[in-house]
Structure formats: structure tokens, C-alpha cells
Image (tube, rainbow, N blue to C red):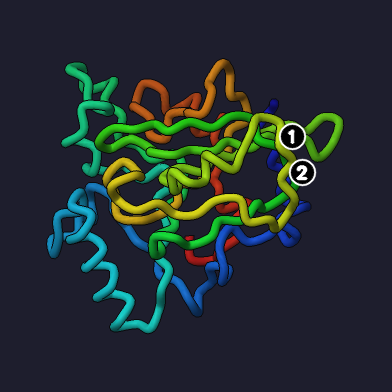
Amino acid sequence: MQFSIFMEWAMLQRPFFASLVHPRPDVENSIALDLSRAHAIPETNLRNPLAFENYLLSRFEKTGIMIALGGYLEPRNLYRDAQLFNKTNDEEERYIHLGVDIWMSAGTEVYAPLEGKVHSFADNAGYGNYGPTIILEHNPAADIRFYTLYGHLSQADLETVSIGKRIEKGQCFAHLGKAEENGYWAAHLHFQIILDIGNNFGDYPGVASDKMLAYEKFNCPDPNIIINCPLI
């Protein structure tokens, strides 16, 4: 599917997408979190789930806010300790984030932003991986077909879905997983739009290398077109 066709459709639909989480992330209840290499957070080890959750809690307590989000096309150091992302060739190291992360507490409900069906799902187990993952397929018009990926979910969610299952707009179909089941991350949702999913099943790269970025940033448009939060 062409990027321009999707963006034209999505811009018209933007006010009408259901929120992925409740409450809907906005300037009053959320903070933008910059995890890029240029703005590394020195107070904590970001790859230690407990330390990072404590860091977020301290931020939330100071502001009275309980949602943090951001990350699209953000170059990150977060993945350097996971063999999954590292290559001997620097050009092929995957470190540029292709989704938006929504950091909330484990167990937080995840809702479908629009009607779709389950394309695929999998438990992408392993340190630094997605953990339980669900991909929805959306076909809202004759010439519009795309996919949304939800990573770092609860393992119990995979027991309630099946390929082809209809998911209604605004329906709760998943929950944020705990560190021990979500790839060993602090609890959050990785949300990503995919235009051409190819042969991928239950998985799609959420981080790009310099070599693949030119393609991936058009195949995976900014998820904020659906989240619609003015902070990011």
C-alpha cells in the first residue's frame, strides 16, 4: 500500500480513532519521554525493568501523571545489550525505533483504535524481544489495507485470540505484560503501523538499521497519526 494513500486517509480519520489506552494520552495526563542517544537518562539503567519503573514512578509522582510516551524514529542505545539487534557491521545495527511506546503499569488494558481482525500473533520470547505480540489487519476501504502491531503484551492475551477473529473499534483485546513475560522490559505498549507486512507472521521489526531506514520509515508511518497526542 502506498504511503501517500494511507496518510491522506488517516489524516481524515484522525479525530475518530479510538484511544489505545484509557485515559487517552494528552498534554494534561502524559509526559513525552526522550530515550534517544543524545538525551540518555543518567539516573537509571533503562534496561533494568525495576530501575526504569522506579524512575518512571518518580517522574509520575512529581507531576501527578501516569503515562509516558514517545520514540518514533528515535535512535536509541537501549538495544546494545541484546544480541537480537546487534550486528558486526555498524550499518546493519538496528537501533532506530519504528513505533511509539506507551509506558503505563502492567495489566493496563489495550483497545483497538479501529475495526479489524487478527492477522497473526506470537510469543516472541527472549531478552529484548517483543514477548507476546498481536498484529491486527485493517481494511476500512477498498483501496486501504494496513496492519497495527501491539508488542510487550500479557501471555494470557494470546489465549483469547485466533487468526481472523474480529476486533471491534474500542474493544479491549490485550493488556500490558509484566517484565518476566514481555521481553524483560518495564511495562509498556509498543505500537506500530505497517503498510506492507510481507511474509511476517506474529512479528515485524520494531527497530531499523541505517541501511533499512529509508524503506522502513515509509512502510511504518508515524503511529501518532492514530494515537493523536500533541506531545509527540
Q: Which residue is mark 2?
A: 9
Let me know if residue 66 appears in the view: yes
* Residue 189 falls left or right of residue 90: right
Asked if the residues shown at circle 1 and circle 2 are in contact, with their CB atoms under 8 angstroms apart, the answer is yes
| Separation (CA) of disc 1 from disc 2 | 6 Å
Residue at 48% x, 31% y: name it: 122
Residue type at the position of mark 1: Ile
Disc 1 designates what residue? Answer: 5
Task: Say what secondary structure mark 1 lies in.
Answer: helix
Residue nearest the viewer, comparing 203 with 132: 132
* The furthest residue to the right: 142
Q: Secondary structure at mark 2?
A: helix
Please name the amino acid that badge 2 sits on.
Trp
Q: Is residue 151 shown above or below 188?
A: above
Q: Position of residue 4 (x, y in %)?
A: 69, 34
Residue 186's image quarter?
bottom left
Dividing the picture into quarters, in which one does residue 128 lie? top left
Seen at 71% across and 37% down, the residue is 165
Q: Position of residue 212 (x, y in %)?
A: 41, 23
